[in-house]
Amino acid sequence: MTDYNDFAKAEQQPLSLDSIGNRKIFVLDTNVLIHNPQAMFYFKDNVVVIPIVVIEEIDNFKKGLDEKGRNSRQIGRYLDKLRTMGSLKDGVHLENDGYIMVSVTQNIEKELNNAFYGNINDNFIIGTALYFHNFYKKSKVILISKDANVRIKADAIGLTAQNFETESIIFEELYTGIKNICISEEDYHNFSHGNSLTNINIELYSNQFVRLYTNELFDGEHLSGRYSEVDKTIYPLVNYTKNQEIFTIKARNEEQEFAFDLLLDDNIKMVSLVGKAGTGKTLLAIAAGLHKVVEENKYTRLVVSRPISPLGKDIGYLPGSKADKFNPWMQPIYDNMEILLSGKEEQKENGKIFGKKKTSLQDYLEFGFIELEPLTYIRGRSLPNQYIIIDEAQNLTPHEMKTIITRAGEGTKIVITGDPYQIDIPYLDTESNGLSMCAEKLKSEQLVGHITLEKGERSKLADLAAKYF
């Protein structure tokens, strides 16, 4: 988006029935602006109404040090700038020929009494939309909210309500990173002998994996390869071979082989792994990271983190050091690392470092091979030559995801993992979270790879739970 320093027209005129004309009127809920402060500028040629109760709610958040606090302060700066260019009460005329106004009408109480009981902020926002619906009868009034319950209540009284979907994708069409292609028997034979495959007249994305077969019914027998956008060629997998052991574990299915092929490729600077519980996302990422840091010495350290809650929020007043406070949130990471380290016999060359038959997680932490870092403190850091894993990334907003990715310095690789069906943050969903957005928007970039893992490998019981619940 543009930096809105000069977004208002020089000549201002009060908003009236005549000036509105056939414009639509969009009433914004608080959560829309908190999600994206620039949302107020997205509705060009139309009228954006911000109820006064929204300003009051935002005022309660502005002192926070988290993303909500930062966005609240930014909203205040935008509106204060607009205030100097015109009357927010009458509506400030924008360069995009739209209007932004702050509604302070007292007439919503009558509208509310006809619809709801109780002085709830959500009801006041709905009441504002209902007032404009009844007063500006020639215009279509639309309430924009990321809260499903607000949209339901608005619909129940005859208002049009929509989610804020400018920054969202269609989750059912989310890029999986894999495509099935039917080829000739001659090409199949050549590829099976290690030759590459060119002149495929099918749209493929950079680093997309392909299953090649000759039977149009695709009965399961196939060859696997990876597409290179540089020379428009499909190559056999070179970074991971079947049954290869990566820091004590092997891929248990083809999707995990694809994941390892991306995780072990130093030319791929960012990998996203999406999958339900038990598909091995975090375990694969940590195994590849330890392999690259400890055994190949390609990166200076493995940095592992996961969101505690919205990015930047204080991790609390638990006693002890930062590590003590962070430990409860990192327990799933400890569990995965213990699986990898528990059976790792100490080799002679490693024995010179640790002097033990077996290494423990504490050994790797003390010698600087692994760093467990809360996302709270990642803003402002520059992380060169490191292997970074961000777990549970579905709980990040697109802006928070951008903040993390921009921390990557020269030579750094970032791996983001998560399950879009397990979102714990209000107003994020499968289509608007940072993980889904990242996988979909960056799918054509040569430095990026993605795989959606479908098959659960934790246990048969865990796979059943993930499938039916």
Image: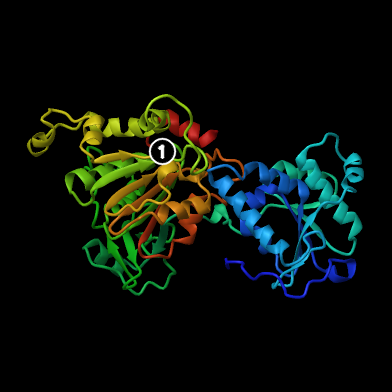
In the picture of the structure, the residue carrying the numbered disc 1 is 456
Q: Give the vertical position of 448 relative to 433 (above or below).
A: below
Q: Which residue is drawn at 49% across and 37% down?
A: 314
Residue 374 position in % (x across, y down): 40, 39
Residue 372, quarter of picture: top left
Residue 52 position in % (x across, y down): 77, 49
Q: Which residue is drawn at 86% across and 56% down?
A: 132
Does 268 sit left or right of 63 as displayed?
left
Crowd band around label 1 with a 10 angstrom C-alpha radius: few (<14), some (14–19), many (20+): many
Q: Which residue is drawn at 41% across and 43% down?
A: 377
State which quarter of the image contains the C terminus: top right
Which residue appears farthest toward the top when viewing the image? 319
- Chosen colour scheme: rainbow
The secondary structure type at the circle numbered 1 is loop
Residue 252 seen from this side? no
State which quarter of the image contains the N terminus: bottom right
Residue 126 seen from this side? yes
Q: Give the vertical position of 210 relative to 63 (above or below).
A: below
**Kind of residue at disc 1:** Gly
